[in-house]
Amino acid sequence: MAKITPPQIIEMKRKGEKITVLTAYDYPTARIVDGAGIDILLVGDSLGMVCLGYPDTVSVTMEEMLHHTAAVARGTENGLIVADMPFLSYHVSIPEAIANAGRFLKEARADCVKLEGGVRMAPTVKAIVEAGIPVMGHIGLTPQTATQLGGFTVQGREEGAAKELIADARALEDAGAFSIVIECVPQELSGRITDEVSIPTIGIGAGLQCDGQVLVLHDLVGLFDRFLPKFVKQYADASALIREAVESYKGDVQSGAFPAKEHTF
């Protein structure tokens, strides 16, 4: 199977094929996610919370994102790798944004980058795209600026806010983004946005009408226990499975059952 490209993702929308996106943060999770046939592997800055124990995504650095993205790239053969640009890596100036985006491709072997923001970030998106770097946009609830938005709450409930989100999506499309993540907005609004732009929309807490869906892998398999967002469907309880295995190991060591003869040279 050939490596998936941004034009193929856009073509999936045209054909009405749903797009699957999951986060991956290291080599083993990339191998699993890519092996399952997921279209896009997102190295999300959510790794700051689920892998590094930070209280939020704002704390994540460029070096940390590059480190994790490179590991994901080593474990991916087919999926499109999208790397989150961390907070303040694309806000200071357009030249700095281009340089940081380029590092993800040159140093970490990502295929694309993702950044948060709509109308205000459109000039930055346009400049990065013109530098030859594919960009995925992100509107609605944008975790890096959640405090400014009033916390982790649903966005676009009022008509004025809904119109702003539609304008954000159009601005990102005009700037050359190949897709847009829509986070925590009412399903009716995400459907309107999906209908009004020609590029794919990827929903997270945005309902069924988006062109694709994304979840944090650690939420999906039950590896992150601090909280579980309402929009997450948990498909497994990996924490319980791992804990049971570790407790069995401890018991075997203490009882002398491990290592057994077959584990000994």
Image (cartoon, grey):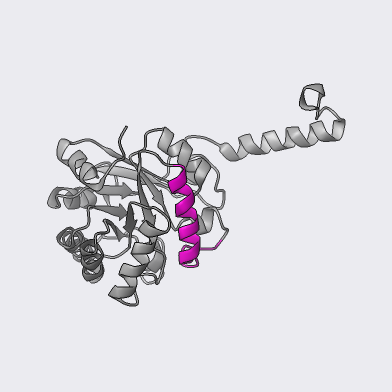
Q: Quadrant of the C terminus?
A: top right
Magenta-colored span? 54-75
141 or 23: nearer the viewer: 23
Q: Residue at x 80, y 33 (%)?
A: 251
| Residue 4 shows in the view | yes
| Side of 210 relative to 223 (left or right) | left
Q: Position of residue 248 (x, y in %)?
A: 74, 32
70 up-or-down from 119: above or below:
above
Q: Is residue 61 magenta?
A: yes
| Side of 42 relative to 236 (left or right) | left
Q: Position of residue 23 (x, y in %)?
A: 42, 47
Specify the farthest residue to the top. 262
Q: Position of residue 16 (x, y in %)?
A: 18, 36
Specify the farthest residue to the bottom. 92
Q: Residue at x 52, y 51 (%)?
A: 227
| Residue 234 shows in the view | no
Q: Is residue 21 magenta?
A: no
Q: Residue at x 39, y 49 (%)?
A: 42
210 up-or-down from 59: above or below:
above
Q: Quadrant of the N terminus?
A: top left
